[in-house]
Structures are given as C-alpha cells and as structure tokens.
C-alpha cells in the first residue's frame, strides 16, 4: 500500500549539510513510510535575520545557502506543509525566506535565547533540528536535478550586471565544482550503522583548521585545538592519535601538530571505529560539530567540551559523555575512563543507543515529519 505522505525536496544551494536530511528522507521512502520527489528550484532565497549582542534583529540582504526547503503533503487531508531546515553554524543567524514563508523551521544550532528574540519576526514555528552529519543514502535519486540545481541556483544568486560579472560567475562555477566533488566523498549511512565493538586503548582527536585565521572566533578555535593536541601528545605519548588535518593554514602555523591519522573520509571513519577514547571540541561559533554524531554512531567513550547548542534530548554527563571545562579536567577524565572499565562500557553503550534513537537521520527526520503531521508515519 502506497504511503499517503509525500515529501518534495526543492533542490538546495548547498548539498553538504543538507545531505543529512535528504538521507533520512530517501531511507524513509525505501522503507515505504513516505514518497519522495525532487523538484528543481532556482529561487535565490536571499535574506538573513541576525540577532545582535543587544538583542536587536538585523535584516540583511545576504544569501543563506545552508537553509533547504521541502513540502510535506498529506493526501488524506490534502494538506501541504512547507518547511525549512537551517544547518548554518551560527545560532544568531536565520533565513529570512524560511522564517517568513515556511510553516515550520528546524534549526541545527538552536539556542532558546535567540529563538525568543527572533520568533516575533517569524511566521514559521521554530523547532530544534538536533545534531547532524554528512552522509548519503544508496536510495538517493534525481542526482542530475541536484547537480543542475546546485550550479544554476548559485549562478543566479551571484548574477549581477557589473564589470566583475564574468570573474564572479567563473569563481562560482569553480566553487560548485569543488563542492560537487566533495559531496561524492560522503559516506553511506550503512557505514555509520555498522558498529565495531573491538577497540583499542588509543585516544583520538583529529581536527582541522579554517580559512580566515584573523577572525577572532576562528583564531580561538585554532589555538584551543593546537593546545589540546600538544597536551594529549605530552600526557599520552604512546596512546594519542590525531592532530591537524594538513592544509595551508595548519602547515604554516601549526606544523608541529599535524595528524598521524589518515584524513580521507572513509579511512578517518575507520580510525574512529578502532579508537577507544575520543575528544570533542566545539565547531565554528559554538556550533555542534559533525564529529560528535560520528563518535556517537560508533559508541565511543567521549570526553567533550560542553555544547552550547540545545538538543531535542540533551546528552547527559556520566551517561553518554563526560564533559571537561579545562585542560586539567580533560586529562583527569581520560585517565578516569582508562581505569574504570565499567564506566567506559556504560558510556559506550549509551552513546550508541543515543545515536540510534536521536541522531540517525531516519529517526530524526521521522521525528520532525511526525511533529508537523501531529501523527505517526507508521
């Protein structure tokens, strides 16, 4: 019997972050719970609302490519629900199009204090999207539509008749070509579903640098990660694996802290699977980094900097993770789980259970669809 529910994916301007939601949809379609169609969209969807430090809402004419758009149709009632997912790093920035023209808006880096401020400018109901990560489904279809939509929408977004038009459009084409090539490296969701309980006693922390080293937030992140890499190498010289992924910034400024672990996505996931203890630090502008989802998927013993992003179901200290607030605590908690095998086992089991229930794209996307429909899919 065909499902009464259909989700239309409007091709997005960004395919990296949105791959998480798409994976959930295509997997749910394969399970027969929904139908999925892909519709070419060339809309610019420009406009950004920002909440400043004084609590004022700024209306800026800026692109917001990390918002993607969908239509949910319930054929039993002929009801159509237009919703957006906001996967932007910043908790203070929102898609103007999404807030003004959607029925529902799901934000990844969700902080209630900013939602309270922005909700008066929104027609959409704003909810927490939760943690995400890059992945893909073998059941994904309409790849040519996604490809054409990526190029065409970004070219239109950057089309402006001026003396620099040719250079700008060529730059856009090159950027989207790199983007499309990177998308091909995303790992199949089955790789995260596969769970290997055979681990070793290594401590893993592999991370990367960002462009714009002069940006204060970026510089603070780099300095924190550099300090932690050096600390872990000193305290656990025979157990620590990781460091900075090689790049122009890391090689020039942090050359003595480069990783000793493979950096290709598949090989890096293999390294996570084998590790015993893993370390998590914040992403850009305190966003929830993908590595937390990856760690949870493999039932790792996670020592983490506390998240500022609020989750639909919080990660609990001592249950799924151990939190550290300074370098001393980081070292102490690594030593604690190294000695207390029962605690380590509990953290591992609960981390994997949390992923299966709350982070797996099938379960999380199913949750948001049922929230909008106000009834179960199955």
Image (spheres, helix red, strand yellow):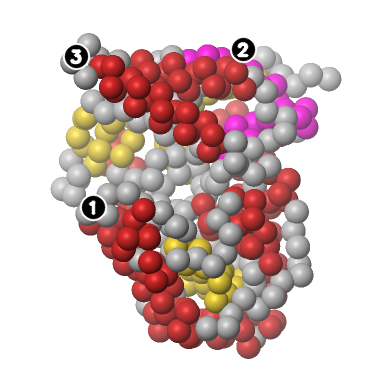
Is 346 magenta? The answer is no
Q: Residue at x 55, y 86 (%)?
A: 335
Q: Residue at x 41, y 54 (%)?
A: 247
The tag earlier along the polypeptide, 2 or 3, is: 2
Mark 1 element type: loop
Q: Which of the two marks, 3 or 1, is nearer to us in this view?
A: 3
Q: Is residue 354 above or below residue 5?
A: below
**Label 3 belongs to which residue?**
162
The tag earlier along the polypeptide, 1 or 2, is: 2
In whole angstroms, how far apart are the C-alphas of marks 1 and 2?
Answer: 49 Å
**Quadrant where the C terminus lies?**
top right
In whole angstroms, how far apart are the C-alphas of marks 3 and 1?
Answer: 29 Å
Mark 3 element type: loop
Assess disc 3: are there few (<14), some (14-19) or many (≥20) residues with their C-alpha within 10 Å of its C-alpha. few
Q: Position of residue 90 (x, y in %)?
A: 34, 45
Q: Are marks 2 and 3 in contact (CB under 8 Å)?
A: no
Residue range in magenta is: 19-41
Q: Are marks 1 and 2 in contact (CB under 8 Å)?
A: no
Q: Is residue 272 above or below residue 141?
A: below
Q: Is residue 140 left or right of residue 48?
A: right
The furthest residue to the bottom: 339
């Amino acid at each position: 019997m065909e499902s009464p529910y259909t989700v239309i994916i409007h091709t997005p301007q960004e395919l990296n972050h949105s791959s998480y939601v798409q994976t959930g949809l295509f997997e749910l379609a394969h399970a027969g719970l929904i139908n999925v169609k892909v519709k070419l969209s060339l809309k610019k969807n420009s406009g950004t609302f920002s909440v400043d430090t004084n609590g004022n809402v700024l209306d800026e004419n800026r692109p917001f490519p990390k918002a993607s758009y969908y239509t949910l149709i319930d054929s039993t009632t002929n009801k159509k629900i237009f919703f957006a997912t906001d996967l932007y790093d910043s908790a203070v920035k929102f898609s103007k199009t999404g807030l003004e023209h959607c029925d529902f808006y799901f934000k990844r880096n969700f902080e209630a204090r900013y939602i309270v401020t922005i909700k008066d400018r929104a027609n959409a109901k704003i909810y927490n999207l939760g943690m995400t990560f890059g992945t893909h489904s073998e059941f994904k279809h309409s790849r040519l539509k996604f490809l054409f939509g990526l190029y065409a929408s970004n070219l239109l977004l950057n089309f402006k008749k001026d003396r620099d038009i040719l250079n700008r459009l060529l730059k856009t084409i090159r950027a989207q070509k790199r983007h499309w090539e990177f998308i091909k490296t995303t790992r199949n969701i089955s790789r995260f579903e596969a769970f290997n309980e055979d681990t070793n006693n290594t401590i893993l922390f592999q991370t990367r640098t960002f462009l714009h080293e002069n940006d204060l937030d970026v510089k603070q992140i780099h300095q924190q990660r550099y300090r932690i890499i050096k600390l872990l190498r000193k305290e656990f010289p025979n157990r620590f694996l990781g460091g900075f992924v090689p790049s122009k910034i890391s090689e020039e400024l942090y050359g003595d802290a480069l990783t000793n672990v493979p950096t290709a996505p598949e090989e890096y996931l293999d390294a996570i699977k084998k590790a015993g203890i893993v370390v998590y630090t914040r992403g850009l502008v305190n966003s929830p980094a993908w590595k937390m989802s990856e760690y949870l998927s493999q039932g790792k013993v996670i020592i983490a900097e506390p998240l500022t992003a609020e989750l639909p179901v919080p990660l609990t200290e001592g249950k799924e993770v151990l939190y550290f607030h300074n370098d001393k605590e980081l070292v102490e908690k690594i030593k604690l789980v190294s000695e207390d095998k029962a605690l380590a086992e509990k953290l591992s089991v609960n981390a994997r259970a949390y992923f299966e229930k709350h982070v797996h794209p099938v379960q999380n996307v199913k949750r948001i669809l049922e929230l909008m429909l106000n009834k179960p899919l199955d």
